[in-house]
Image (cartoon, grey):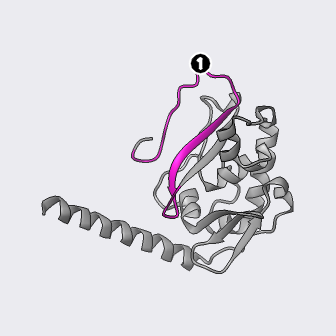
Amino acid sequence: ANASGVYTVDVSTLTAPYVVQVLANAGGQTVLLHSLATAADVGTRAVNVTPLTEIITASVLGTDPQAAVAAGTVPFNAITGSALADAETALERCLAPVLSVAGLGSVDLRSTEFKADHSGLDGVLDALKVTRDSGGYTIALVTGGASITVDPANLGASTTLAAPTGAQLDALTAASGDIRSLLGELAARFATA
């Protein structure tokens, strides 16, 4: 990936569908995240790899993505355009209030391109903390308060996450900018020490 988190993968010698696995830092922890792609995705749309695509991947595969990849038991026949669309739409419904506050309305969580600039979809990802637990995945606002647990096997039955206020999102964006600025200053001081 480049400095903006954008990556390209040559799949010309591979056969679709694809499981994308990325070692990432999410919420201060190193995690393996997954996403899925079909032949129709190649060269036509982005394939995001985020904590939200991890949930979509678990829903489509019907199992824990990390375990399936590690065991070599990925059910590739389950990875279809319609299965991906159904899982993405169901998760988007769960997040609709949060997406609305961020000014996104309808967005494809799996393939909408975004910049790591704390706005739009990136701002939504900054505002959420996703953790895996025995009931599936918990999606919580990092500002506190609202959270939901989603079962990847039944995303359509999941509840909706209450939206943060615009002021909460603005405060989160400002705080993350302040932290980045402070880290930059520290790095500069150590570089000259």
**Residue carrying label 1:** 13
Would you say 37 lies left or right of 113 here?
A: right
**Quarter of the rendering occupied by the N terminus:** top left
Residue at 58% from the left image edge and 57% from the top image edge: 121
Residue 145: horizontal and vertical position, in percent? 65, 81
Would you say 172 lies left or right of 48 here?
A: left
Residue at 81% from the left image edge and 47% from the top image edge: 86
The quarter holding residue 147 reads bottom right
Residue at 48% from the left image edge and 42% from the top image edge: 6
- The segment highlighted magenta reads 3-30
Q: Nearer the viewer, residue 34 or 171?
A: 34
Kindly identify the amino acid type of the residue bearing the numbered disc 1: Thr
**Quarter of the rendering occupied by the C terminus:** bottom left
Is residue 128 positioned above or below 113 on the image? below
Residue 53: horizontal and vertical position, in percent? 66, 50
Task: Classify mark 1: helix, strand or loop.
Answer: loop
Q: Which of 15 and 44 is in front in this view?
A: 15
